Image (cartoon, rainbow, N blue to C red):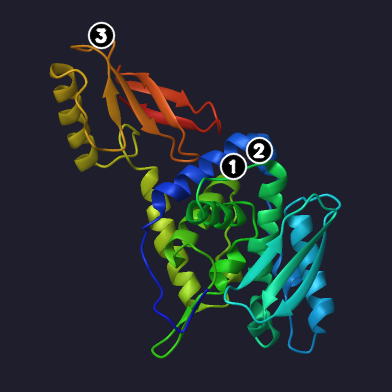
Amino acid sequence: MANGSEVVHGYPHLDTVRAAITAVYRRLSREGLYAYAASVAPADVAFADADDLHLGAQRVAHALVQQLRLPEARMIVSFREMEHAASVELAAGPEYFIELNDRFRTHRRDIGAALAHEITHVLLHRLGLSFPGTRDNEILTDTVTAYLGAGWLLLDAYREDGVSSQKLGYLTPEEFGYVLAKRALAFDEDPSPWFTSPQAYTAYADGRDQALSDGRRPPLTAAGWAGRHRYAKDRRYAQDHPGAVTGLPYTFEGGEGDTGLRVSFPCPTCHQRIRMPVRGRVRARCGLCRTVLECDT
């Protein structure tokens, strides 16, 4: 939780975010992810100042449990002084205990964001899905929260002006925007009307540009002239120098000339690597998310 301190911007965790998207596709499958195609509705997680603190927190937690499709999971929410925004006790269930920072007693509009992250921890615990190391595991949690339809709350909790700032979660605002845009492209859902924070909308727009650029990289046919020109140059080099490393998202494998030469590149939807022969125009289907890709290899 950044509260009053400088908010980090940009995409410092992008590789881990993309690995998290791949991991959730592998764990839940494309069909399983479509159960989360609709995000939690703003009305279901709204929290007015006049609402009872504990009853309101339980109501919002219940809505998020339903959004994340957690069966028989009862969240007991309490408040206390603590360093972090929130914490959850992970056990076998069926009850889970979530503690929220006392500051949320007077910042009730952000209770849903804090609960979304902690309840996703419960989901990942039940799925047996984790990354090594605290930092990467928290990035996984933020990414999954956003991709499964509850993370727009975390981005909407980002506010910044000339004298103060606030952000929840481990991702930067632009990284949250990136994951939400990835979700929007996959499920045809636009979260931008739900943002109450102008800074959240700006971060989403930035992240959406980054997400769209994933679909405009060679060998995809949507790549621009400069990308296609660079790809053709790298392909010729790979044909003459088998095993050469390009240092770009795509890599070439195989022998001299066209015979046996293959290209490997990340799927723009789930980021699993796709390998295919170098043979000009071809249509490929990602084996993980089943996205159909038009390529010019």
Instruction: State the separation of the CA atoms marked 1 and 3.
Output: 36 Å
Height in image: 127 above or below 148?
above
For label 3, the residue is 259
Seen in the picture, residue 271 relative to 147 is either above or below; the reply is above
User: Measuring 72% from the left and 55% from the top, which residue is drawn there?
Assistant: 90
Disc 1 marks a residue whose amino acid type is Val
Disc number placed over residue 28 in the picture, else none: 2
Residue 36 visible in rendering: no
Q: Secondary structure at mark 3?
A: loop
Please determine whether, in this image, residue 82 is positioned above or below residue 286: below
Which numbered marker is on residue 286? none
The x, y position of residue 253, in whole percent, is 28, 20
Figure quadrant of the C terminus: top left
Residue 23, relative to residue 284: is it above or below?
Answer: below
Residue that carries the numbered disc 1 in the rendered image? 24
Q: Dot 2, how many residues are within 10 Å of its Cα: few (below 14), some (14-19), or many (20+)? A: few
CB under 8 Å between discs 2 and 1: yes
* Disc 2, SS: helix
Relative placement, left or right, of 4 versus 297 is right
